[in-house]
Image (cartoon, grey):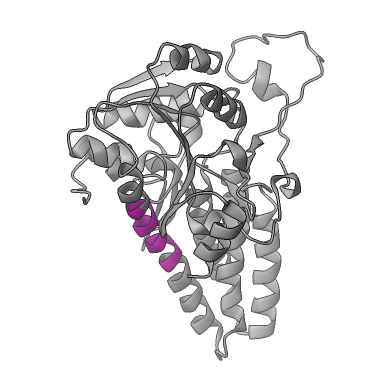
Amino acid sequence: MMFTMDNKVFDIAPVKYSEDGLHILDQTRLPGEENYIKIETKEDIWDAIYHLKVRGAPAIGVAAAYGLYVEAECYDGESVTEFRRLVIEAAKYIESARPTAVNLSWAVNRVAAVLDRPLTTVAEYKRAMLDEAKAIHDEDIRACKAMGEYGLSLLKPGMGILTHCNAGTIATSKYGTCLAPIYLGHEQGYDFKVFADETRPLLQGARLTSWELSKAGIDVTLICDNMASTVMKKGWIDAVVVGCDRMAANGDGANKIGTCGVAILAKEYGIPFYMYVPTSTIDMSTPTGDDIDIELRKGDEIYKMWYKQPMAPEGVKTYNPAFDVTDHKYITAVITEKGIVKPPYDINLRRLMEK
């Protein structure tokens, strides 16, 4: 099973790098407008990540890797010592944009680690940083293809599939994580019926998942988050597929807020719950989900952002965590680019990462 890569949706890349520089698809403008913005400084990439112009753990990592290189290119001196200092400062700054998605720190630190090589000139270090960023980009494309192939082995033609948030082609370098098997199955004539949670408060399921699946010609039905139990009870859902922003060593997985509730519902209705996790998102230094730093965002996103006028009293208290953690006991299997992992996760994830 291989992607033919002839679906036009794959032409929409969230991160583009060429001789013209680094450009990011502004996902806050979707689905109404496909607009690319140029990234020229560390402030630009920080803003793009924090304000969700680029989002999805793998895409954030790729964008940040290129972003660090772009900032390094701004240095026009010849002092290797000064160059190293500026790159390390920039790496820490970019990494601070969002704390939960581990790909951000992983990618930035991987590009910054180039500074440890025994090179002699600033130009050599810059070239090596760009090569590392491109390698991260290429590896993510291959990982998503592999996850699509492994993931499709768990699904059958005609299935109803529920997904939450967006872990598709615009959340990664290409193809997506949990949407990759849906695209592959579509090419193979599987005729999936996809149900996309809207994913409050930022509506990634409504604005992004339903948009890209519709663009690809896949049967997708948009539902409100609080309708998930209804479509499950009706027997319309045969599997749940979601992405992941950070997986702990014991298999607990942080993903967009609301994922945990979907997993609990799936368990109650006897529906398999599959979490798609590239190995770059598995953080073996984080013991459990309780140790994952959960990003808190502004309350305006809940009651102001999508409305012409506020939909709650001005000054009302809000609580707006961007992610929640799904306990490993609710996860049927973890799909990675290296294969499918099943419980016990504390043992089998460690074995996977040691391969």
**Residue 217, relative to residue 224: is it above or below?**
below
**x and y percentages locating residue 209 in the rendered image:** 41, 30
Residue sitting nearer the eye, 36 or 343: 343
Q: Is residue 51 visible?
A: no
What residue sits 56% from the left and 78% below the top?
A: 114
Q: Is residue 209 left or right of residue 43?
A: left
Specify the principal SS of the magenta part: helix
Q: Quadrant of residue 49?
A: top right
User: x%, y% of residue 19?
Assistant: 36, 63
The x and y percentages for residue 95 are: 66, 56
In the image, 140 versus 79, the foreground residue is: 140
Q: Please tell me whether residue 138 belongs to the stretch shown in magenta.
A: yes
Q: Please state the extent of the stretch shown in magenta in the rendering.
A: 135-146
For residue 37, side relative to residue 52 (left or right): left
> At 23% across and 35% down in the image, what residue appears?
186
User: Closest to the observer: 30 or 40?
Assistant: 30
Image position of 32 with respect to 123: above or below: above
Q: Is residue 140 visible?
A: yes
Asked which quadrant contains residue 286, the reply is bottom right
Q: How many marks?
A: 0
Residue in the picture at 33% in, 47% down: 148
Q: Is residue 29 above or below residue 167?
A: above
In magenta segment, residue 236: no
Residue in view at x 37 percent, y 50 percent: 147
Residue 85 occupies quadrant: bottom right
